Image: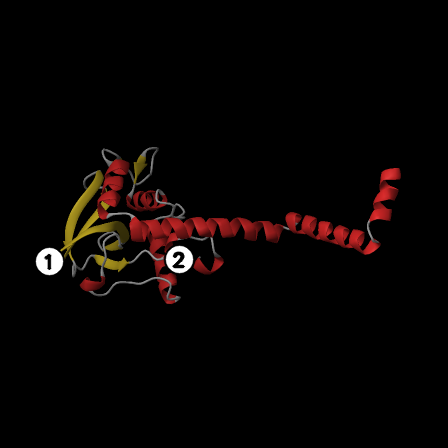
């Protein structure tokens, strides 16, 4: 009791009241759901920005190619995505996420839909000219006979041809092949923008 009385004698009442108000405000912020989400979100966004910068600006083509081979050498293709197997979309997603991207597990149609939505918001570039295509752009194919789509990632350009990596059912494992830029089977080619890289972590990028 004496300690409490000495405390009140030592400090003016306004100092004590101010300290209490500040303490209560800090407690409120720490317990606030919105504050916690924003704080967590900013850290995740920063990590995504750093990983995106590394993949698009600092990682070499050789490193990216070696990582693909390391991930999928002797791995089996499976549309059912059984343990340790991949289809075309899960292979691309797993590859980009290994660099820190935030893709959720989705099929090619869902990825295509998200790309089209981001394009309508000017948050991703759909490449129309051969000269605009860069290595490690995504390439989506329309399989007209089945009505399905296929996805790969471009690793080379040579005289109007595009070299792409994929996981495909024809080879039953990873593939590396070339296709002419004007091939009718190509549905679209897109650069990997930050909006696509970050996935659904930010509402405006969903």
Give the Cα distance between marks 1 and 2: 31 Å
Of helix, strand and loop, which one carries label 2?
Answer: helix
User: Badge 2 local density, few (<14 within 10 Å), some, or many (20+)?
Assistant: some
- Can residue 77 be seen in the rendering of this structure? no
Q: Nearer the viewer, residue 36 or 122?
A: 36
Q: Which residue is mark 2?
A: 195
Q: Residue 115: image x %, image y %?
A: 35, 59
Task: Name the mark on residue 55.
Answer: none
Which of the 4 quarters of the picture holds residue 190? bottom left
Residue at horizontal 31 percent and vertical 43 percent from the top: 95
Q: Residue 89: image x %, image y %?
A: 31, 46
Residue at horizontal 36 percent and vertical 51 percent from the top: 52
Of helix, strand and loop, which one carries label 1?
Answer: loop
Q: Residue 59: image x %, image y %?
A: 28, 47
- Can residue 58 be seen in the rendering of this structure? yes
Say left or right for 20 vs 29. Answer: right
For the residues labelled 1 and 2, say whether their Cβ atoms are less than 8 Å apart.
no
Task: Name the mark on residue 159.
Answer: 1
Say left or right for 174 vs 89. Answer: left
Residue at horizontal 26 percent and vertical 34 percent from the top: 75
């Amino acid at each position: 009791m004496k300690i409490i009385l000495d405390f009140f004698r030592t400090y003016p009442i306004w100092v004590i009241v101010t300290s209490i108000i500040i303490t209560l405000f800090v407690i409120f912020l720490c317990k606030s759901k919105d504050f916690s989400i924003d704080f967590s979100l900013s850290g995740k966004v920063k990590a995504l920005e750093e990983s995106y910068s590394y993949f698009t600006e600092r990682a070499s083509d050789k490193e990216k190619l070696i990582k693909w081979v390391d991930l999928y050498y002797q791995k089996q293709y499976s549309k059912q995505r059984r343990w340790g197997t991949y289809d075309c979309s899960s292979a691309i997603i797993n590859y980009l996420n290994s660099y820190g991207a935030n893709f959720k597990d989705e099929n090619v149609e869902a990825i295509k839909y998200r790309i089209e939505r981001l394009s309508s918001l000017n948050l991703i570039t759909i490449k129309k000219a051969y000269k605009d295509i860069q290595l490690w752009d995504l390439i989506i194919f329309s399989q007209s006979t089945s009505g399905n789509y296929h996805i790969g990632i471009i690793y080379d350009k040579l005289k109007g041809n595009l070299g792409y990596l994929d996981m495909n059912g024809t080879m039953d494992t990873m593939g590396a092949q070339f296709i002419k830029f004007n091939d009718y089977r190509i549905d679209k080619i897109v650069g990997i923008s930050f909006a696509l890289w970050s996935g659904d972590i930010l509402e405006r990028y969903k």
